[in-house]
Structure formats: C-alpha cells, structure tokens
Image (cartoon, rainbow, N blue to C red):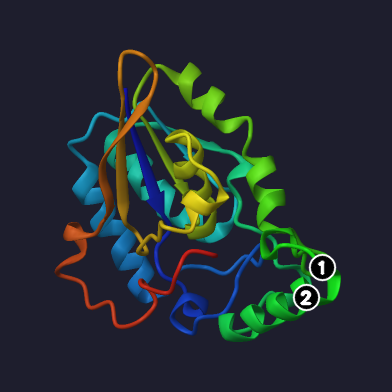
Amino acid sequence: MRLLLIRHGQTEWNAAHRAQGHADIPLDDVGQQQAQALAEHLATHEIHEVWSSDLLRAMQTAEPVALSVGATLKTVELLRERSFGEWEGLHFREIGSNIDEASVAQGVHKADVRPPGGESIRDVWNRLSPLPELIAKAQQPVAIVSHGGTLSLVLAKLIGGSLVTARAFSFHNASVTELHRLPEGSWRLHRLSDIAHLDRINTLGGNLDGVHR
C-alpha cells in the first residue's frame, strides 16, 4: 500500500510566519496555484481516498486533488493542526519565547507546554494515536492532507519514532511525502517533502516556514 502525506498550500499567515493553529485561514493566491499544480501532479497516481483536516486551508488543497484522481474525500478532524489557543496569530519567534518561559516557570518539558486555551505537542501526539490503525485498515492507497506540525507527528508514529523523531521533519507547503507499507506491516519512506511539481510557481516566502502550522 502507498500512503501520501500532503501539506496544505500557502496562506498569508504562512508567508508572515504567524501561527495558524485552528484559525481558519484560506489559501492565498500562491497557495491556490500550488494546490492546482499538486492536483495536476497527482492526476496519474492511484489514490482511493483523500483524508483531509477539516480546516479550510487543508480542504482547499484536498478538493482539487480528490477531483483530479476521482477519489472519495473524507474530512478527519483529528488531522487538524495543533491549537495554539490565545497564541494563534503570533509570530513564531514570540511563541518560541512564550514556550521557553512557560517551560521554566511550570517546570515541564517544552513538549508539555500548553498555550492558554490550546494544545501541547504531546496533546496532539496523543490525539493522533488512532491514526496508524485507521491507515492500516484502509488497504487501498490513501492521501492525507494536513498541516506541517501534524504531519511530522504522523510520520514519526508510522516509522516507529517518537516526539524527538518528529522534530527532524519539516514540510514545504503543498509538498508530497510518500511511504510504502512493506509486507510485514512496517513503513518505508520513499520521498520526503517533494515539491518538484511546484517548480513553475513563484513561491517567495511561506513554504519553508517550519512545521507547526
């Protein structure tokens, strides 16, 4: 079985390096071009279902893909990005400082810092716990359209990694990461954050802005 992990296209907040979390920010003009180029790239791929985060930027990326391959589109709420609560909209430098301060003040690991009204990274890790079994039951090729931070955790889970492993992964906007499931059930990484299909698009800023979106 083949599995594709796809990050949503660029938004204005991506380009400005602002945390979106659960804020429902649409794709910007570049993001819409990326979504179309992605759909054209995947048009010849065998994809049985497209699973998407229910947030707008993911759905606007997933819909052209599902249409291009003739696949069923399903919204999966657990694929949402981490909620940053009251910190949504802040620049990531400011969020980094907030996390550092909270980690010291609360005496907890950074992965356990929970923004006011939001989620810690470990909360998202736990939220995603059912996903590997859901994927294993699919049997047919699936494309998952989600968010940078979420995808890093999904990939770490699938390859038997940890929260530390997840920190090694980052995803360009509208990138494709491909895994193949081996006969014994483990996953092999075939390509990571591939954006060759975006070569013709001017993507100044936004698509290299890190993983927590």
Name the spot of residue 11 as percent of width and height, x first: 46, 73
Q: Residue at x 28, y 41 (%)?
A: 68
Q: Residue at x 55, y 24 (%)?
A: 134
Label 2 to label 1: alpha-carbon separation: 5 Å
Where's the N terminus, which quadrant?
top left
Residue 122 appears in the picture as rendered = yes
- Determine whether the residue tagged by mark 1 lies in a helix, strand or loop: loop
Q: Vertically, is 144 above or below 193?
A: above
Question: Is residue 77 visible to the viewer in this orientation of the structure?
Answer: no
- Quadrant in the picture for residue 171: bottom left
- Residue position marked by numbered label 1 in the rendering: 107
- Front residue of 29/83: it is 83
For the residue pair 92 and 108, the one nearer the viewer reads as 108
Q: Secondary structure at mark 2?
A: helix
Q: Quadrant of residue 168?
A: bottom left
Task: Report if the CB atoms under discs 2 and 1 are less than 8 Å apart.
Answer: yes
Q: Is 174 placed left or right of 190 in the picture? A: right
**4 left or right of 212 in image:** left
Q: Amino acid at mark 2?
A: Val
Q: Mark number for residue 104?
A: 2
Q: How far across and down, in percent of the image, does residue 31 sit?
A: 37, 68
The quadrant in which residue 8 appears is bottom left
Q: Which residue is found at the position 48% from the left and 40% from the top?
A: 161
